[in-house]
Structures are given as C-alpha cells and as structure tokens.
Image (cartoon, rainbow, N blue to C red):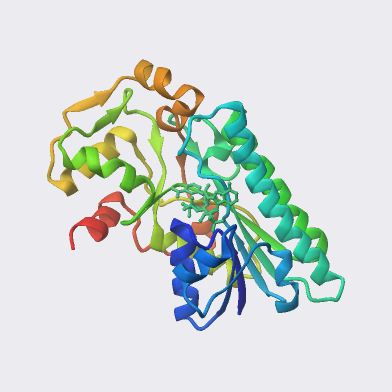
C-alpha cells in the first residue's frame, strides 16, 4: 500500500509509521519541517511539506492526524484559531490531493481522519455511542469542522472514516507523560470531584484500529476510538496510582483549575462515557480492553 500520513512525526503517527514500514508499505509523511522529520523517521520514509506535493506518488490511502496540540496552551482566542486552522488547512490539503488524483481516475481509496472524544462535549455519565447527540461547545465545534472537511473527500470517490479518539496511552508521550511525574512524586490525585469520564485507548490499539479501517472497504463514517471500558477520572487516578505503586491522596479543586486554565479546564473537568459501538459491531478485537490491561502493558514490564 502507498500510505500518506499527515502528523506522522506525532505520538500516534510515529508509531503508525513504524508499523506500516514493518508491514512493507510505502510510507509518505507530511510535515511542516521535512528536514528534521526525515532525520527522525529514517531514509525509507519520504517527507514533504504538503499532501498535494505527493500527487506524483499517487498514494492509495491517507491517514490525517496533523494539528496544533489541543492541551499545550491555554485556549485564548488566537490559540483556538490555531487549533481550528491547523486542522482545516491539513485536511483541505489532503482533500485537494484527492481531487487532483480523481481527475486522472486515481483518487485514494480511503481517508482515515482524526477527530476526538471532544466531538460529544460534556455528556455527564450518560453512555455515549456514535449516535449520541453532541453538546455544543468549542471542542465539539472543532471536531465537527474537522470531520466535515474530511468528508469532502467523498465527492472524489474516496471512502472516509473519522476517528473520535480517546486519551491515547503509552510510554514516551501523550497523557501519561503529563500525568506520571506528579504521580511518581506521590502528589497525584483526582481532578475536581473525579466523576467525569476519561475515555482512553492504548496507542497500539489505536494504530490497529487505523489499520482495520484502512482495509475494511465496507466501513465509513464516524467511529469512537476508545477502549470498551472507559473510566471516570477517579477510577483512572486509582489505577494509575496502583500501577506506579504510589498513593493518590491529593485532589485538584475545580475552581482552582478553572482559574488557572479558563475554558481549557473543560478538557479535565468534563467528559463522555464513550463506547466504541461501531468498531465492536464491525468485529474489531481490542488487545487492551481494560485500563488495567493497558497500564500493566505500559508500566509492569
Ligand atoms: N494523543 C491523544 O491523546 C489524542 C486524543 C484525541 C485526539 N487526538 C488527535 O489525534 C491527532 C494525533 O495525535 P498525536 O497525539 O499524535 O498528536 P501530536 O503528537 O501532537 O502530533 C500531531 C502532529 O501534527 C503536526 N502539528 C503540530 N502542530 C501543528 C500545527 N500548528 N499545524 C499543522 N500541523 C501541526 C506535527 O507534525 P510536524 O511538526 O511534523 O508538522 C505533529 O507531529 C491529533 O490531531 C490530536 O488532536 C489525540
């Protein structure tokens, strides 16, 4: 397969690149800095600054993961614009490539494009499937725009699947890299009242889901990419403390977090009990269905 990946230097994308190379696929990556991305990813990966620049390579599948990190900076108006525009730009670039290739009858067969659990917004403790109506808030509007742009590739004959991704867990980055230092010091604890849901997924399972959707021609639309057993923040806190052999006596009061992070505090204080209904219905088999399975694989080596 000739596979084009945007965000191939990221936490998820870099693992996808490794697996795709190991499986013998030809891998192309879009990066804002092709020289340093090329050094990181190795000489067998071709790196260019835009998806459209790969028109001569005729990719037959695309995975679209690029975007300004969601939780690295406070959500000022300018940062919100960066979150939106980075994803809109990357996705339009990919769709433009589909359009150019369609003109010669060689449109990519499939686009698997990012989205996030934030699509649903705050859902309290209600069980959330792909059918659940979203709560209108910034995270929802961001994901909705991202999915909407991706679906434009369908006009050129490309199958589109969007992944509403939960917190991605593995060593070397993502949520755990942010959380574990405090927990290792023994000052970890729940956030607010701890009742908010934190859908999560082991990075290996996410990469396997992407591979599953790349090859299953009958699957399109939105898919919840979270493990089948989401937990609350309190449950996550207890499990992480257990696997790191540390107590979790503290908690971060919600008003403090709201004062410190503003609207971005919603990422930590609200959530959705998101279930991967469509993936399970399609027969996807999770290797790490419970948080204990995932944390054991990551920490108990
Ligand atoms: N990790 C999670 O827990 C999680 C959860 C839900 C959703 N997601 C979504 O899934 C996608 C992949 O996640 P990830 O953790 O692998 O993300 P990541 O590590 O932050 O990587 C995303 C990639 O996007 C590119 N990028 C960063 N800022 C950009 C900007 N301003 N404009 C254009 N490109 C930019 C970077 O590539 P270059 O520097 O090479 O250009 C980066 O490697 C992201 O879009 C993320 O929002 C992730």
Which quarter of the image is occupied by the N terminus? bottom right
* Residue 134 in view of the camera: no
> Measured from the top left, where is residue 151 in percent x and y?
73, 53
Query: Residue at 65% of width from left, 71% of height from top?
Result: 61
Residue 84 x %, y %: 64, 40
Relative side of 124 to 66, left or right:
left
Q: Residue furthest right?
A: 103
Residue visible at 45% across and 47% down in the picture: 166
Q: Residue at x 39, y 49 (%)?
A: 174
* Residue closest to the eye, 12 or 285: 12
Q: Position of residue 229 (x, y in %)?
A: 37, 47
Closest to the observer, 68 or 222 = 68
Looking at this view, name the residue that lies furthest to the front.
35
Give the quadrant of residue 247: top left
Q: Quadrant of residue 153?
A: bottom right
- Residue 10 to residue 68: above or below: below
Please tell me which residue is depicted at 82% across the width and 67% down the height of the picture: 100
Horizontal and vertical percent for residue 75?
A: 53, 29
**Apparent side of residue 108 relative to residue 188 in the rendered image (left or right):** right
């Amino acid at each position: 397969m000739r596979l084009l990946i945007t965000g191939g230097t990221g936490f998820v994308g870099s693992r996808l690149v490794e697996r795709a190379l190991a499986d013998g696929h030809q891998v192309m990556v879009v990066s804002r800095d092709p020289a340093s991305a090329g050094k990181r990813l190795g000489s067998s990966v071709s790196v260019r600054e835009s998806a459209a620049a790969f028109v001569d390579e005729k990719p037959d599948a695309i995975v679209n993961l690029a975007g300004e990190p969601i939780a690295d900076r406070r959500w000022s108006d300018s940062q919100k614009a960066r979150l939106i525009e980075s994803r809109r730009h990357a996705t339009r670039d990919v769709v433009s490539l589909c359009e150019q290739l369609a003109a010669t009858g060689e449109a990519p067969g499939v686009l698997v494009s990012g989205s996030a659990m934030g699509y649903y917004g705050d859902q309290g403790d209600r069980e959330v499937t792909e059918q659940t109506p979203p709560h209108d808030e910034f995270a929802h509007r961001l994901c909705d725009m991202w999915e909407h742009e991706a679906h434009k590739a369908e006009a050129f004959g490309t199958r589109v699947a969007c992944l509403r991704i939960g917190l991605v867990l593995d060593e070397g980055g993502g949520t755990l890299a942010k959380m574990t230092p405090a927990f290792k010091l023994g000052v970890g604890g729940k956030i607010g009242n701890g009742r908010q849901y934190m859908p999560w997924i082991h990075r290996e399972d996410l990469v396997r889901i992407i591979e599953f959707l790349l090859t299953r021609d009958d699957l399109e639309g939105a898919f919840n990419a979270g493990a089948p057993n989401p937990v609350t923040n309190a449950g996550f806190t207890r499990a992480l403390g257990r696997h790191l052999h540390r107590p979790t006596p503290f908690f971060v009061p919600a008003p403090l977090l709201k004062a410190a992070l503003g609207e971005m505090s919603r990422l930590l204080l609200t959530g959705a009990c998101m279930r991967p209904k469509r993936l399970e219905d399609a027969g996807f088999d999770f290797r790490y269905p419970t948080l204990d399975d995932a944390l054991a694989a990551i920490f108990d080596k």
